[in-house]
Image (cartoon, helix red, strand yellow):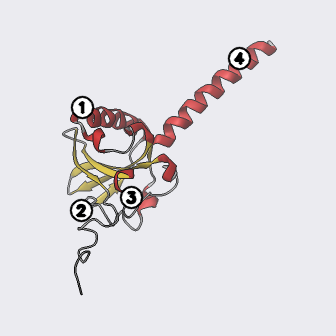
Amino acid sequence: MNHKVVMALAFLAFGWAADAASQSTAAVALKIEAFKTGFRNCSRPTPQGITWFWQVKQPDVERIDAALIRHLERTGLAENLRASPSAYGRQYLGYNRGYRRFVYVNAFLRSSGDARSAYQGSCDGGDQFWGIEYDVKQKVFTDFEINGVIGDPVENPLEGLRL
C-alpha cells in the first residue's frame, strides 16, 4: 500500500477516534457498579422508589442526550445554568420504578470531574451540578434539579437564629 494512503487513513482514523472520545467524555452511560451504594446528592433530590437498575446503551445515551440539549434550550432551563449545557459532563443511569423505565442524567461542569470514572455526586455547588429524569416510554424530561449552595436556608435551617 502506498505510504501516503496509509498516512491519510491513519489521520482519518485518529480524527474519528478523537471525535468519539470527546463525545464519550461529555455524555456517558456509567456501569451499574458505579451505583452500588446508590446515587445521592446532599443538596438536591435524586429519584426515589427505584426497584431495579439497568445499563443504558451508548447509542441510547447519544439519542437521549441530543433530546436533552434541545429540551434545556427550548424550555429555558439552560438559562438557569452557569454555562452552556455542552460544558457539562453528563452521566446516564437506567432504573425502574415498578415496571416503568427511566433514565437519570447527572450533570456537572466538566472541570469538576470525569464523566467516565465514578458517579459525580456533590454537596452544594449550585448551578455547577444538576440532574434531570427522562421517562423512556413517554419520552419526556421531568424533575430538573440544581444543587443548593452553601448557606441556602434549606441547607442550613439554623442560619440567622440566635442561640
Earlier-in-chain disc, 2 versus 4: 4
Residue behind mark 1: 74
CA neighbours of label 1 inside 10 A, class few (<14), some (14 to 19), many (20+): few
Q: Report the Cα–Cα distance between label 1 and label 4.
A: 41 Å
State the CA–CA distance, disc 2 to disc 3: 22 Å
Identity, as a three-letter code, of the amino acid under mark 4: Ala
Q: Which mark is residue 48?
A: 2
In this picture, residue 43 sits left or right of residue 161? right
- For the C terminus, the image quarter is bottom left
Q: Relative to residue 116, is residue 42 depicted above or below?
A: below
Name the quadrant containing residue 153.
Answer: bottom left
Residue type (three-letter) at the residue carrying disc 3: Gly
Q: Nearer the viewer, mark 1 or mark 4?
A: 1
- Dot 1 or dot 4, earlier in sequence: 4
Whether pointer 2 and pointer 4 mark residues with C-beta atoms closer than 8 Å, the reply is: no
Of labels 1 and 2, earlier in sequence is 2
What is the secondary structure assignment of the residue under circle 1? helix
Callout 3 secondary element: loop
**Mark 2 and mark 4: span between their CA atoms?**
51 Å
Per the model, the C-alpha gap separating discs 3 and 4 is 45 Å
- Assess disc 4: are there few (<14), some (14-19) or many (≥20) residues with their C-alpha within 10 Å of its C-alpha: few
Query: Which circle marks residue 8 in the picture?
Result: 4
